[in-house]
Image (tube, helix red, strand yellow):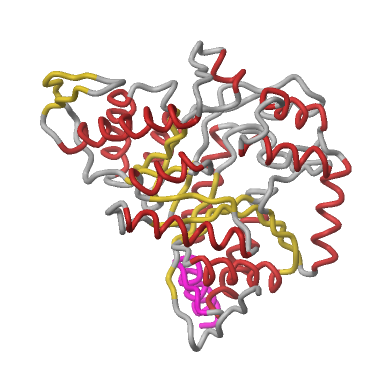
């Protein structure tokens, strides 16, 4: 039976709020009708400064090495994640900046040094999202695509994280493992404190790696019972692995409007221009790997001809807030990561309309605090 959210009188939780910034053109709406999202540094700087102003806690950037030659030219232009965050570190003052590194493309000592440098630039605001792969043809252009089973990649990832953490904590790195060796390598500069490491691994091996080796677990956001059970399972597995401090965040794509009908009209408009060539291109490398989580995700999008990724919530401000409330309460989430079609106008709407409603449901955030302060100031 689906859980009913508790009332605000009986439930209180302060969550972190992040925005998944659009470092590749087109953002996360795979449609010719998508809002203009150029994937430039200037646009990402504008989005991140806005997010900081609104009270968001984290700006997260993905990594994507290549696009596809489709009608929309989606993701044909993309920034590099870690160097982008270094630029944003100088441009911002409060928001945490989490870049992404693929373990098949980055040596852990190199990535750790880059993150430590970003941490110094930002005065302690750097973090790292670790992924084990990418679209096959994307990493293949770097001659780094490794078709080994997922379990093998996450074994490498666990050692990768171990070496990176040694860089941040030890004066010199001594390591003799299956994938990496180091004999007293000098580790400098140091971060202000150990940067947080996150992962969104959804396979069994990825789930285990995240629970054991990471500080944050990312999920595709949903308020259905199966998704909520996975959120709870991650914390259970982390406790059993001696990593009781693991924090969980769900990634929601939000299409906010004043009414459910207006929101659905936007979805219909985006789906009318779905770039099926792009979606089929995403699915093609996984056609024979029926158990792959990415394949399942892309297959659902292709079957439904949907331009928006799994986990999107389209509806009125009340509807979206209620569904997020269900996920946060039921899944004991520590935060949410937000994607929106229009990263300027929609982000403002989410901050002004959705987060205050979450606060009314007992789910507070720095966004709601900022909103309350701005409202109080204008009232005075």
Residue 332, image x, y percentages: 47, 67
Residue 309, image x, y percentages: 69, 45
Check residue 376 for magenta coloring: yes
Please, is residue 302 above or below residue 338 in the view? above
Instruction: State left or right for residue 267 relative to residue 64.
Output: right
Please, is residue 323 above or below residue 239 in the view? below
Corner quadrant of residue 106? top left
Determine the main secondary structure of the stretch shown in magenta.
helix
Please, is residue 280 above or below residue 98 in the view? above
Q: Which residues are magenta?
A: 362-380
**Foreground: 179 or 130?**
179
Query: In which quadrant of the rendered image does the N terminus lie?
Result: bottom right
Instruction: State left or right for residue 52 relative to residue 313.
Output: left
Residue 13 visible in image: yes
Residue 164, image x, y percentages: 27, 32
**Foreground: 291 or 327?**
291
Measuring 32% from the left and 56% from the top, which residue is drawn there?
A: 240
Measuring 44% from the left and 51% from the top, which residue is drawn there?
A: 58
Residue 55 visible in image: no
Check residue 228 for magenta coloring: no
Residue lying at the far bottom of the rendered structure: 9
**Foreground: 236 or 48?**
236
Instruction: State left or right for residue 22 relative to residue 238.
Output: right
Measuring 50% from the left and 47% from the top, which residue is drawn there?
A: 48
Q: How many marks?
A: 0
Residue lying at the far right of the rendered structure: 272
């Amino acid at each position: 039976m689906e859980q009913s959210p508790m009332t605000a009188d009986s439930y209180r939780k302060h969550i972190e709020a992040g925005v998944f910034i659009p470092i590749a053109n087109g953002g996360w709406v795979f449609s010719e009708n998508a809002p203009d999202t150029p994937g430039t540094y200037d646009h990402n700087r504008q989005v991140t400064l806005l997010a900081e102003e609104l009270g968001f806690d984290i700006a997260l950037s993905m990594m994507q090495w290549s696009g596809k030659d489709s009608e929309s030219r989606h993701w044909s232009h993309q920034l590099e994640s870690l160097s982008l965050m270094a630029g944003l570190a100088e441009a911002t003052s409060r928001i945490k900046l989490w870049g992404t590194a693929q373990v098949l493309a980055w040596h852990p000592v190199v990535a750790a040094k880059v993150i430590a440098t970003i941490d110094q630039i930002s005065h302690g605001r750097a973090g790292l999202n670790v992924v084990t792969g990418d679209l096959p043809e994307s990493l293949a252009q770097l001659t780094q695509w490794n078709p080994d089973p997922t379990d093998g990649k996450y074994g490498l990832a666990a050692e990768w994280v171990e070496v990176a953490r040694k860089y941040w904590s030890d004066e010199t790195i001594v390591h003799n493992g299956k994938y990496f060796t180091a004999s007293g390598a000098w580790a400098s500069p140091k971060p202000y404190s150990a940067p947080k490491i996150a992962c969104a691994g959804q396979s069994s091996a990825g789930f285990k790696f995240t629970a054991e080796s990471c500080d944050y677990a990312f999920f595709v956001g949903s308020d259905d019972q199966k998704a909520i059970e996975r959120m709870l399972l991650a914390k259970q597995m982390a406790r059993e692995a001696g990593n009781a401090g693991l924090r969980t965040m769900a990634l929601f794509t939000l299409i906010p409007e004043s009414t459910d009908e207006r929101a659905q009209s936007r979805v219909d408009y985006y789906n009318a221009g779905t770039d099926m060539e792009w979606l089929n291109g995403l699915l093609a490398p996984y056609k024979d790997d029926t158990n792959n989580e990415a394949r399942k995700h892309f297959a659902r999008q292709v079957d439904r001809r949907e331009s928006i990724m799994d986990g999107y919530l389209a509806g009125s401000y009340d509807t979206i807030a209620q569904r997020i409330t269900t996920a946060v309460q039921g899944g004991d989430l520590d935060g949410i990561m937000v994607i929106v079609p229009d990263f300027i106008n929609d982000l403002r709407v989410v901050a002004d309309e959705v987060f205050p409603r979450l606060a009314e449901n007992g789910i507070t955030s720095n966004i709601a605090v900022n909103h309350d302060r701005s409202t109080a100031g204008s009232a005075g």
